[in-house]
Image (tube, rainbow, N blue to C red):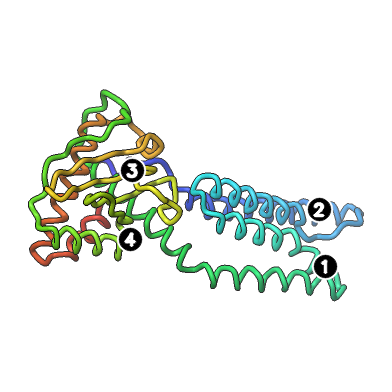
Amino acid sequence: MSNRSKLRMSVGLFYPIAMISCYIIAIAEWGIRSWLIREGMDIHQMPFLTYYICGAFFISMGIYQWFKYRLWVYLVIGILVGFLCVQGPTMITNDYFFTKASYFITLFVLALFVILNWSTLYGQERYEINSRRLFKLAAELIVETADGFTDRPFYAGEIKASQDELLGFSRFLEGKYVARVFHEERTIFLTFSLNRSLITVVKPKEVSHISINESGIMTVFISESDYRQYRRTYNFNQLCQSIGEVCKRFMEYYQQGLEARIITELKTAR
């Protein structure tokens, strides 16, 4: 089986790629400025342009993640980090107290904001990572690529479990940030998403989910935005069925007291 990811690149990977690119640009700009200085041009050697490019990147990513996840925390962090990048070269090259003070004030506000919102940031990252693992796991044995997305829930069979077992199972998944749980009309919804932040979800049907009613009947719904994250057009019914089978298997692990196998299996998904 190919080791290439079945899903499109995570947004989080944009950051290391951008930072490496900025380092390369900074080295190039430093070299160009050094050459211009040797040629007699009166300019500073500080790579101002690179700092501004980094600032624009962080602000743009903050706006993008705000729209993608509907989580305002990313917007604030993006703007603050962007301002730090823009203020950085001025703070280094300028001796004015106000310039240096404004930089450290922005840095302090950023650190304080991250600390106060750490639980939200951590929860969002864990939910997204495990959602990616779940979608990868579901697609491991699917080879058929016909028939694309449909917007209807898919009947995925029944789960043999008591109500207490279902409640305990759902609490375990939520505690491990595998799925966020909702309870509506005697039905348990296990929600997961590659796009919308589960932290901001109000109604479970806004995102991909598995629903299990009091009789154990299970249905699977995958949102179009999540389905489009696959590199290939997998058979939609098979994909829903596979997610249902993964849920059944995880329930069996839970009933046997093998909860650790759930996390291990998710981590090994390719």
- Residue 63, horizontal then vertical, whole percent: 60, 48
- In the rendered image, which residue does mark 4 sit on? 177
Q: State which mark lies toward you, 3 or 1.
A: 3
- SS class, disc 4: loop
- In the rendered image, which residue does mark 3 sit on? 208
Q: Residues within 10 Å of mark 4 (few under 14, many from 20)?
A: many
Q: CA distance from mark 3 to mark 4?
A: 15 Å
- Residue 135, horizontal then vertical, whole percent: 29, 45
- Report whether residue 230 is seen: no
**Label 3 sits on what residue type?**
Ser
- In the rendered image, which residue does mark 2 sit on? 35
**Label 1 sits on what residue type?**
Thr
Question: Are circles 1 and 2 on residues that touch, CB within 8 Å?
Answer: no
Residue at x 41%, y 51% (from the top left corner): 202
- In the rendered image, which residue does mark 1 sit on? 93
- Residue 37, horizontal then vertical, whole percent: 86, 56
**Label 2 sits on what residue type?**
Trp
Q: CA distance from mark 4 to mark 1?
A: 45 Å
Residue at x 17%, y 58% (from the top left corner): 166
User: Is tag 3's residue or tag 2's residue first in the polypeptide sequence?
Assistant: 2
Question: Are circles 4 and 2 on residues that touch, CB within 8 Å?
Answer: no
User: Is tag 1's residue or tag 2's residue first in the polypeptide sequence?
Assistant: 2
- Report whether residue 111 is seen: yes
User: Is tag 4's residue or tag 1's residue first in the polypeptide sequence?
Assistant: 1
Q: State which mark lies toward you, 4 or 1.
A: 4
Q: Nearer the viewer, residue 99 or 171?
A: 171
As drawn, is 178 to the left or to the right of 215?
right
As drawn, is 132 to the left or to the right of 30?
left
**Label 4 sits on what residue type?**
Tyr
Q: CA distance from mark 4 to mark 2?
A: 53 Å
- SS class, disc 3: strand
